[in-house]
Image (tube, helix red, strand yellow):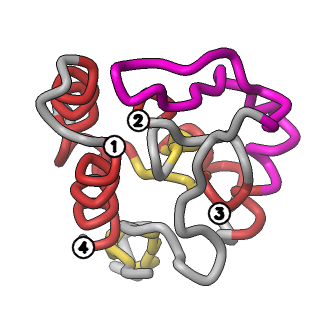
Amino acid sequence: MKLFFIGVLLSLSFSITVVAFPTTPNPELAKGSLCTTKDKDYVEKRYKEKIPYCFRNVSVSVKNQIFALYRIPKKYHGQYTIDHIIPLALGGDNSFENLWPEHKKVKATRQNLEIELYWALRNSEIKQKEAIKIILEEKFKH
């Protein structure tokens, strides 16, 4: 897991507090996980490939547990979204293995990637395996 540092000017004494936030998922905590037909959130199979699809089901309690795993103080939670490493649209699930706190500045660096991969998968221009490879390379490289 890589960290991005932000320096914050606190007072006229010019003391600086450094706030670090993860720019990649921590591979010791989460590597991505796929929906299966046995998943409690499974809805249907989608696309020509018949990929199991799970609906979004991440409770506030689970989100808070993810924040705690990544040691993100409550006062900073609003700067993050709890992101699916493998997006649901690509066949990801809602397990801890597939969730991480993504800072909004990090998310902004790849705004359209998930949508582009979704459309490519939906239109059979790409296979799920290839879409997942692209998304994982992107999310773990920063």
Q: Within 10 Å of the Cα at label 1, are there few (<14), some (14-19), or many (20+) other Cα atoms?
A: many
Measure the alpha-carbon separation of dots 4 and 1.
Answer: 20 Å
What is the three-letter code of the residue carrying label 4?
A: Lys
At which x and y percent is residue 15? 41, 82
> What number of labels is visible?
4
In this figure, which residue is indicated by the disc labeled 4? Answer: 141
What quarter of the picture does the N terminus occupy? Answer: bottom left
**Residue at 74% across / 69% down in the picture?**
69
Mark 3 in CB contact with mark 4 (< 8 angstroms):
no
Q: Nearer the viewer, mark 3 or mark 2?
A: 2
At which x and y percent is residue 98? 60, 54
Measure the alpha-carbon separation of dots 1 and 3.
Answer: 32 Å
At which x and y percent is residue 84? 52, 44
Mark 2 in CB contact with mark 1 (< 8 angstroms):
yes
At which x and y percent is residue 74? 72, 51
Measure the alpha-carbon separation of dots 2 and 1.
Answer: 7 Å
What quarter of the picture does the C terminus occupy? Answer: bottom left
Q: Within 10 Å of the Cα at label 2, are there few (<14), some (14-19), or many (20+) other Cα atoms?
A: many
Residue closer to the observer: 98 or 26: 98
Disc 3 secondary structure class: loop
